[in-house]
Image (cartoon, rainbow, N blue to C red):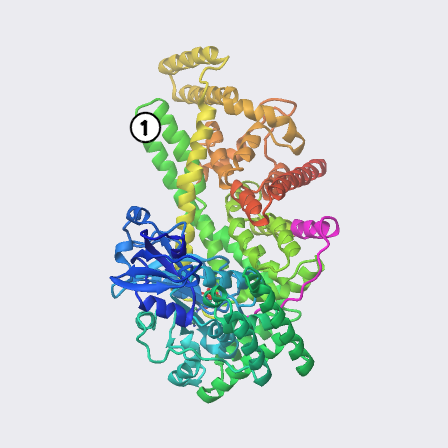
């Protein structure tokens, strides 16, 4: 609701003041600030100005101005929670504490990709958003808050963008955010070692006539290079305060926030609105269009007329759409087109190009006066390193060596702590089994929960090692090089380098990877990337690989592990190629790959990254996996009676009796072994007869040709929730297999021992290296987990694609496993 909609006598509480620059400033000075109560004293007919009472003053506003002041009713305001803001500032989800008003400052971080916005945001607010040394890491706005000097800052971290033309999704996103959410202050984060390019965005912010502060980030780089910048002078030239910062170390952040307060309270002497001079002809056109815009009060107050005029000269689609929503749109657009053709005739160039040139001219002029360029050591180093790492011949082998090292460490180094955790879980399980009273509760805790959770928990070290490598690659900037080297190959399959980053992120988790495709401009490219991402083997599948590789391929684990990942990549390539030929015929879009300078990652950021990953993993273990474990256990536990149970029980009693009268130790031992065997048989029969067993048998015919049996089927089915659940399900299912306590990995033993219990293969092991391989490939390819399926639906905008992917992947998995099993079992 806006103020213009209120009638005489009604009251409202202000929640937002839109508009820009001087208008906004004036209206706020009059007392129209967030949280204030306004009363409509008198409204006049025929859109005349109305009289309002705010802070005890009577003020008159035109409807076009009142329209920009958003209000809510007093009742709604009273219902507002009074805690400090956390969440999104917009009218639907408003959570501002009204009492605390005036002390709330909304701040948006805007800047080029990879200039340190997220680092700054994280440092200030204690958030843990993903940071990486390549562009396109942040794809949507992140919100958080921060308190300083009695002010509450509502911060938003926006995706990186080079410009504010409405050309890429992220540019549009940032621009829309600035217009619709009207942050009180925009913090323009700038990479100090790359001023010229970064200031281009600043020049666009200047046109918009909003309150901007520059965070001159990576100031350490600037200083190290020996460059000297006269900050104060540059600040005066731009009319924008500049604060040097080092986001990773938190340097300069208190100054930045003090400055935000100063600017917000209009206390900073350097703040002024400057006009970049676009040259005589263009300035004349701007003037003509601006005059036309000013005829329409509504249009004039909603957006800076100069900015709008410039955007119209650039033929910016969104500016045109904005204008067409207004009454005088015809006149304004007509004037604009007339001016555009005049300019083009006169200067033989498009308005857009002239404006860009003028902006760069302005920037280089400003820098010439203030910057003494040093020798950027960072780039010297970077170039030297790149000579080796992206070498024409050695680049790729080095990349693969690095990959080998990554998987080798993941498997080999991880196996030590894995053994310790496994032993610990075993001891705990045994202890509880004895101490807790016998019965269903005991079974649930030990056979169910500890068994299931324990079997997944042991893989935490492996996951951590994998992420250690990934975050090292990301933070140093090597990941961007990998993308660069892959660009050629990506082109061959009809994609380009931009798709590579999301794909690499897919090795961590497919869900953020699919979200990261938002940086891809071309829609079909984007969809294609979304559809092949699930073939990137995510870290949730790692526990399954490690378990099975440990059990069946102990001689060359690293190779098998790499083989699986490569198979995934190969399938992605084939799929992309196939889709490109059939579903979409995408055109190649030109693309420039960013190669940021190499940076030494800070231990802190790596430790933090790994800590976050373990927290996420543990959360998953305590959440989805725990629930799945309990369900699987219960389905396997009930019903309790089996058809042979009475017979087996009587044999048990019999043997027990024999043990008690057995004379020598040998006989006693033999009987104990028999006893264990029968006890296990009871459990096995009970499991087979349970609900879970019935489900397993029901689906068995489908997976029999792959060499799998009913228990394997259940494990695969349970993996739909999350892939780790496959392992915990196997843990629960196999607890009745003997494989007891010998060696340090009980589950591995059990996997080797489990036998077919019916059908033609009865008595033979379920898993041979061939069926194990078929199983691993099936796991790699089949049904992406529920989270991924819904991410596909959300990001592609159609459920149809999500269902399609479920069918496509599962069919592919079946076919691959089928051929591996059929061919493999004939060969070996
Ligand atoms: P964003 O894309 O703008 O969000 O940038 P990120 O916050 O993801 O940071 C990009 C890279 O720059 C990361 O590798 C950071 O560790 C690094 N970085 C951020 N701020 C600084 C800084 O002030 N100095 C240095 N040397 N590196 C920084
Ligand atoms: Mg970011």
Please state the horizontal and vertical placement of residue 740, each as a whole percent of the image: 44, 32
The question of residue 114 being in magenta is answered with no
The number of numbered discs placed on residues in the rendered structure image is 1
The residue nearer to you, when weighing 537 against 331, is: 331
Q: Quadrant of residue 271?
A: bottom left
Question: Does residue 127 show up?
Answer: no
Figure check: 804 above or below 310: above
Q: From what the image shows, is residue 370 above or below residue 390?
A: below
* First to last magenta residue range: 570-595
Most distant residue in the right direction:
581
Please state which of residues 386 and 371 is positioned toward the viewer in this rendering: 371
In this view, the residue in front, 710 or 750, is 710
Check disc 1 and report the residue beneath it: 434
Question: What crowding class fits label 1: few (fewer than 14 Cα within 10 Å), some (14-19), or many (20 or more)?
Answer: few
Q: Check mark 1 vs ligand 1: CB closer than 8 Å? yes or no.
A: no
Taking the image as shown, residue 628 lies to the left or right of residue 41, namely: right
- Residue reaching furthest to the front: 45
Q: Which one is nearer the viewer's eye here, 96 or 550? A: 96
Q: Position of residue 293 (x, y in %)?
A: 53, 70
Any part of residue 122 in sight = yes
What residue do we see at 64% from left, 74% from top? Answer: 338
Q: Position of residue 122 (x, y in %)?
A: 38, 61
- Where is residue 76 shown, x and y percent of the image? 33, 47
Q: Is residue 581 magenta?
A: yes
Dot 1: what SS?
A: helix
Displayed quadrant of residue 828: top right
């Amino acid at each position: 609701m806006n103020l213009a909609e209120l009638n005489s006598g009604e009251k409202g509480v202000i929640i937002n003041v839109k508009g820009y620059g001087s208008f906004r400033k004036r209206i706020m000075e009059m007392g129209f600030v967030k949280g204030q109560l306004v009363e409509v004293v008198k409204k006049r007919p025929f859109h005349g100005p109305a009289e309002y009472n705010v802070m005890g003053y009577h003020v008159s506003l035109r409807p076009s101005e009142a329209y920009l002041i958003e209000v809510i009713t007093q009742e709604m305001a009273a219902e507002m929670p009074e805690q400090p803001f956390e969440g999104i500032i917009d009218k639907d989800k408003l959570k501002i504490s009204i009492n605390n008003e005036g002390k709330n400052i909304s701040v948006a971080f805007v800047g080029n990709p990879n200039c340190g916005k997220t680092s700054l945001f994280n440092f200030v607010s204690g958030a843990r958003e993903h940071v990486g040394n390549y562009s396109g890491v942040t794809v949507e706005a992140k919100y958080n808050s921060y308190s300083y000097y009695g002010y509450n800052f509502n911060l938003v971290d926006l995706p990186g963008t080079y410009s504010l033309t409405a050309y890429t999704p992220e540019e549009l996103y940032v621009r829309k955010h600035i217009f619709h959410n009207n942050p009180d202050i925009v913090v323009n984060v700038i990479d100090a070692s790359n001023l010229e390019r970064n200031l281009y965005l600043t020049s666009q912010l200047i046109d918009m006539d909003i309150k901007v502060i520059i965070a001159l980030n990576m100031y350490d780089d600037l200083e190290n290079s020996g460059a000297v910048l006269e900050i104060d002078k540059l600040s005066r030239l731009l009319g924008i305060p500049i604060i040097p910062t080092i986001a990773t170390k938190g340097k300069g952040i208190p100054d930045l926030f003090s400055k935000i307060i100063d600017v917000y309270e209009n206390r900073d002497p350097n703040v002024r609105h400057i006009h970049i001079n676009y040259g005589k002809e263009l300035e004349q056109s701007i003037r003509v269009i601006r005059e036309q815009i000013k005829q329409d009060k509504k249009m004039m107050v909603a957006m800076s007329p100069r900015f709008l005029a410039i955007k119209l000269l650039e033929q910016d689609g969104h500016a045109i759409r904005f204008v067409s929503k207004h009454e005088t749109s015809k006149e304004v657009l007509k004037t604009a087109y007339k001016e555009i053709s005049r300019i083009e005739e006169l200067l033989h160039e498009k308005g857009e190009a002239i404006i860009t040139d003028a902006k760069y001219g302005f920037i280089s002029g400003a820098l010439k006066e203030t910057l003494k360029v040093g020798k950027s050591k960072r780039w010297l180093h970077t170039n030297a390193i790149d000579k080796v790492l992206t070498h024409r011949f050695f680049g790729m082998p080095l990349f693969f060596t690095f990959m080998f090292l990554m998987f080798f460490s993941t498997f080999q180094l991880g196996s030590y702590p894995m053994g310790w955790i496994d032993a610990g879980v075993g001891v705990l399980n045994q202890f509880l089994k004895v101490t807790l009273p016998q019965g269903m509760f005991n079974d649930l805790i030990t056979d169910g929960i500890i068994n299931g959770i324990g079997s997944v928990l042991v893989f935490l070290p492996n996951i951590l090692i994998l992420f250690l490598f990934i975050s090292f690659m990301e933070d140093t900037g090597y990941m961007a090089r990998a993308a660069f080297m892959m660009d050629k190959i990506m082109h061959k399959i009809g994609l380009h380098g931009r798709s590579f980053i999301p794909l690499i992120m897919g090795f961590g988790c497919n869900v953020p990877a699919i979200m990261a495709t938002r940086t891809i401009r071309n829609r079909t490219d984007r969809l294609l990337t979304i559809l092949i991402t699930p073939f990137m083997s995510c870290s949730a599948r790692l526990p399954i690989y490690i378990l099975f590789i440990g059990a069946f391929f102990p001689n060359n684990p690293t190779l098998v592990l790499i083989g699986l990942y490569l198979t995934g990549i190969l399938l992605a390539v084939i799929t992309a190629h196939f889709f490109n030929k059939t579903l979409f015929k995408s055109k190649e879009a030109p693309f420039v790959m960013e190669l940021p300078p190499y940076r030494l990652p800070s231990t802190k950021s790596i430790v933090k990254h790994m800590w976050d990953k373990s927290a996420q993993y543990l959360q998953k273990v305590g959440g989805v996996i725990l629930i799945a474990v309990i369900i699987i256990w219960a389905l396997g536990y009930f019903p309790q009676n089996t058809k042979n149970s009475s017979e087996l029980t009587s044999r048990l009693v019999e043997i027990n009796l024999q043990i008690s009268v057995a004379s020598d130790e040998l006989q006693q031992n033999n009987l104990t072994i028999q006893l264990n065997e029968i006890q296990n048989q009871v459990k096995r029969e009970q499991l087979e007869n349970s609900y879970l067993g019935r489900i397993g048998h029901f689906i068995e015919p489908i997976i029999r040709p792959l060499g799998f049996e009913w228990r394997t089927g259940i494990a695969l089915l349970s993996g739909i929730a999350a892939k780790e659940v496959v392992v915990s399900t196997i843990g629960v299912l196999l607890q009745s297999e003997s494989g007891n306590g010998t060696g340090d990995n009980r589950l591995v033993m059990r996997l080797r021992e489990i036998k077919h219990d019916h059908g033609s293969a009865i008595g033979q092991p379920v898993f041979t290296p061939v069926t194990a391989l078929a199983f691993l490939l099936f796991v790699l390819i089949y049904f992406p987990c529920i989270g991924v399926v819904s991410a596909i639906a959300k990001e592609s905008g159609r459920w149809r694609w999500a269902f399609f992917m479920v069918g496509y992947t599962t069919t592919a998995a079946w076919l691959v496993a089928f051929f591996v099993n059929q061919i493999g079992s004939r060969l070996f």
